Image (cartoon, coloured by chain):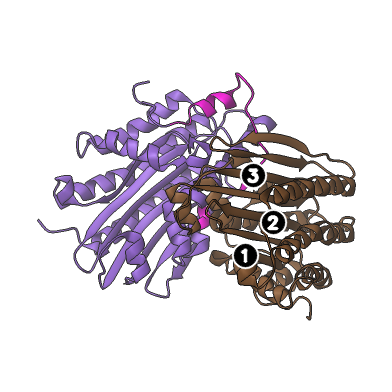
Chain colours: A brown, B purple
Amino acid sequence: MKNIPSSEIIAWFKGLQNDICRDLEILDGKAKFQEDLWERPGGGGGRTRVIKGGNILEKGGVNFSLVEGDLSEPMAKALKVEKAEKFKATGVSIVLHPKSPMVPIIHMNVRYFELSNGTYWFGGGIDLTPHYVDKEAAKLFHEHLSDACENTKAGYYDRFKEWADNYFFIPHRNETRGIGGIFFDRLHHESEGLNPDQLWHFVQDVGESFIPAYKEQALRFKDKEYGENELKWQRLRRGRYAEFNLVWDRGTKFGLESNGRTESILMSLPPEAHWDYDVQPKEGSREEETQSLLKKGIDWLGQ
Amino acid sequence: MKNIPSSEIIAWFKGLQNDICRDLEILDGKAKFQEDLWERPGGGGGRTRVIKGGNILEKGGVNFSLVEGDLSEPMAKALKVEKAEKFKATGVSIVLHPKSPMVPIIHMNVRYFELSNGTYWFGGGIDLTPHYVDKEAAKLFHEHLSDACENTKAGYYDRFKEWADNYFFIPHRNETRGIGGIFFDRLHHESEGLNPDQLWHFVQDVGESFIPAYKEQALRFKDKEYGENELKWQRLRRGRYAEFNLVWDRGTKFGLESNGRTESILMSLPPEAHWDYDVQPKEGSREEETQSLLKKGIDWLGQ
């Protein structure tokens, strides 16, 4: 069976970006995406779409990019691949920071990479960062991901959920970024025991799970009341989000170090973050409960 | 001539911390430092002192630490030193974020490192990050550093000023963190053509230049008027400060990756930071002028 042509993947990713932007504008009911088209000097470019000041979405981005060209020595080293002539990398990346501290932050990425020597892989992930963890809502979120995973292969959810727990982790805080989700990288149909179509459909299922999974969270919490206490906590949690992205996220790191488009990469940062010395949530508070749930290995489906 | 005993260096660093905290409290006139003593499981510990909510200082820290113990393989690798039995590292680190956007952010560090095999070195630096660059004030700041440098050895200022330009640089923004200052690392008296006393006095001169250099800046700008526009710009510049510290600062990186005390390391972060997509200062504005001065190689003394 033949591999999926990159042209098909690229077209589908662009379509996904369109669909998600449209659905998010409807969901938000106020803000509209602003688009920036950009070109990469070495080859390729992107379609950065950012949104701000919405009813629900305070700041966010839904970005498509396709970068291609000569594979440099440092890039080959960073990617741990053998030297090849050319590479192509394409994907859709999303981060949404809601206005309300009661609504979770969400991130999604699906990506495809290929080398002119025939190597290719898919990667991606979705994870949710509630400012306040609600166990029932966390279960609903993970159910969407479990469905997307198990639809392709039994065991995928457990495997990619564990991967997310390890990836979306802030070592210097000894806490996860949020309630996790799924994460996967360097998936090739052969090593997965799938045919090319099956693997590609899995990636598509992940991409398509974004809107239903996030819409459910946003609608559930968007009208929940909050005050200065919740906003203060949100700003501290946003600081942790910035810490993860700037210190530990391999995608951000690779982008910034390889001279990627800074404004597109850093659209993931929150609109605002606060840092204070050694903040400890009050005993018995909802903040303390959330803090206690920011750890690996929680069985959100079965709790 | 004998090397300076580490006990003498440690005692002097603690004294420097005391002096600087006292002088900053007097300068601020309102806020007082809070002290946290901490111990490091592998050996050593520190005296973290933080300040907040002052007349001038919104958030800052003046930290002393002495960490010592067995030198692990990864540490030896990260420090690019041959394996030795034991190490000792001590220093004073300062970052101050002023309330007013008209007053600059300042950073200083002086440090000493030794191995049980007899290797030792000094490192350190001071740099200033004005939210608004004022050329005359920048000159005054660099004059303090030039005096501290040239007092020990002709050429030190130029050498360490260039080093600071390269170190306090944000590659993904293609801008310097501020107007620079001086930076030096791994100085040993032999390779510097000095005797141990001369090198040690140089480090002391740098430490002692902090208060006069910063006091002058704070007093010059503390009563300058500002409004929402300046505060907005300050929050964006604080975002850049956080980006530098979290993405590029080798000290922060080393600390976070080697399981250092997170709250002491991240006292350097601003109280608040904002990110917005692709902000461009208005043509002809003071913000644009500052942006144009955030580059390497400016001769602040001779401009």
Q: Quadrant of residue B254?
A: bottom left
Residue at the disc numbered 2: A4
Considering every residue shown, the one lying at the far bottom of the view is A302
Which element is circle 3 on? Answer: strand
Considering every residue shown, the one lying at the far front of the view is A1
Which sits earlier in the primary sequence, circle 1 or circle 3?
3
Which element is circle 2 on? Answer: loop
Which sits earlier in the primary sequence, circle 1 or circle 2?
2
> Residue B152 location in percent, x, y?
20, 40
The Cα atoms of the two marked residues, 1 and 2, are separated by 11 Å
> Mark 2, residues whose alpha carbon is within 10 Å: few (<14), some, or many (≥20)?
few
**Residue A149, disc:** none
Residue span colored magenta: B266-295
Q: Amino acid at mark 3?
A: Leu
Q: Amino acid at mark 2?
A: Ile
Camera-side mark, 1 or 3:
1
**Residue A66, disc:** 3
| Residue at 61% across, 49% down | A89
Q: Amino acid at mark 1?
A: His
- Any magenta on residue A108? no
Q: Quadrant of residue A147?
A: bottom right
Q: Is residue B1 left or right of residue A196?
A: left
| Residue at 69% across, 67% down | A195
Please state the chain letter of the residue tagged with numbered disc 1 in the rendered image: A
Which element is circle 1 on? Answer: loop
> Residue B21 location in percent, x, y?
44, 51
**Residue A188, disc:** 1
Q: Is residue A289 visible?
A: yes
